[in-house]
Image (cartoon, rainbow, N blue to C red):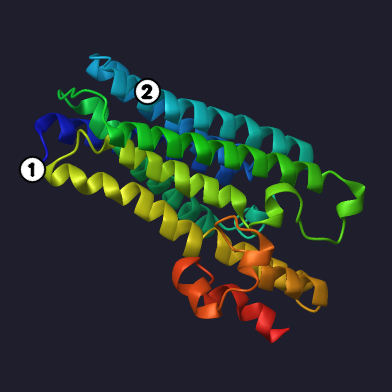
Amino acid sequence: MLTDTDKEFLSLTATVTAGYQLFFFLIAAVFQFDKLTDLAGSTNFVIIALLTLVKKGSWHLRQVVLTAMIVIWSTRLALYLFFRILRWGEDKRYDRMRHNVGNLAVFFIFQGLWVWTVTLPVTVVNASDKDPSIQAEDIIGWIMWFVGTIVEILADKDKFSFKNSPESKGKWCEIGLWKYSRHPNYFGDILLTWGYFVASLPIIEGAEWLVLIGPVFLTLLLLFVSGLTILEKSGDKKFGNVEAYRVYKKRTSPLIPLPRSIYGNLPYWFKAVFLFEFPIYNRYLNRN
C-alpha cells in the first residue's frame, strides 16, 4: 500500500507536471512557436526532482544522488535541445503539429506522461522515510545511469556534427556510435531510465512498485510510438531504394550497440527476439 506521503508526492508531481505542460502547450498553440517545446519537457524533470527533495527535506544520500542524476541528465538535455533548435531554426518533427491543435495537445499529453512516469523512482525515494545503507542495487543503478548518459551525450555529439557537415547532405548518419546502433541516443535514454528504477529498489515495497511504470513506459514509447518507428519510417522513405542503406540496416543493430560483424551474421529470429529488430521497422523498406 502507498503511504500517505507517497500519495501526496505523487499527486503534487502530477499536478505540477500537468500545469507546466499546459502552460507551454498554450504558448505553442497560440503563437505556433515550437522552440520551447522540448525545453518544456526536459526542464520539467528538474522541477519535479528538486521540488520533491526540498519538500521532504531529509536529504538522505540516496535521495540526493538520485535527484542529482535527474537534474544533471535533464539539464544537459535541455541545453542541447535548445541549442539545437536555435541552430537549425525549426524541428521537422513538429511539422504535423505546428498548425494542428489536436496533434499538439496529444504531444504535450505524452510529454507530461513521460516526465511524470520517468521521475516516479525519484519521487517515491524522496518521499520515503526509509534510509537503508547503500546496497548493490544502488551502485548498479548509478552505473547504468552513468553509462546511459555518456552514450546519449556521445550519440548527440556525433549526430550534431554529422548534421552540420556539408558532406552529410543526402546521407544517413553512421559515424561514431551510429556505426554500431541505428539509434544509440535512445539506447542511452532507455538504459539510464532503467538505472533510476534499479537505484530505487532498496526503498520500494508493495504498491510502490508502480515506479516500474517509468522505464516500461519510456521503453514502449521509444520502441513503438515516438522514437524508432517514426525515424525508421522516415529513413526508409528517403533512402529505401539505395542498396548501401539496405545493407546498413541489415548489418546495424536498431538499438543496442553491437559490432556490425557480429550483428550482420545473426539470424533474424534472434535479432527480433533479443535485439528489438521488429518487422515494423522495415515496413517501408520492404515497400521500396
Q: Is residue 5 left or right of residue 117?
A: left
Which quadrant: the C terminus?
Answer: bottom right
**Dot 1: element:** loop
Query: Is residue 48 placed above or below 245 in the rendered structure?
Result: above
Please tell me how crowded label 2 is: few (under 14), some (14-19), or many (20+) other residues with Cα within 10 Å: some
* Residue 271 position in % (x across, y down): 52, 72
Distance from Cα at disc 2 to Cα at disc 1: 25 Å
Circle 1: residue type = Met
Residue 77's place in the image compared with 271, above or below, is above
Circle 2 sits in a helix, a strand or a loop, which is it? helix
The residue lying toward the viewer, choosing from 247 and 33, is 247
Kindly give the residue lying farthest to the right in the view shown: 166
Residue type for callout 2: Val
Residue 60, above or below 76: above
Q: Earlier in the sequence, mark 2 or mark 1?
A: 1
**Quadrant of the drawing holding the N terminus:** top left
The residue under label 1 is 1
Q: Position of residue 215 (x, y in %)?
A: 37, 49
114, 40: nearer the viewer: 114
Q: Position of residue 76 (x, y in %)?
A: 58, 30
Q: Residue furthest bottom?
A: 287
Q: Residue at the spot x=47%, y=53% of the render?
A: 105
Q: Which residue is mark 2?
A: 65
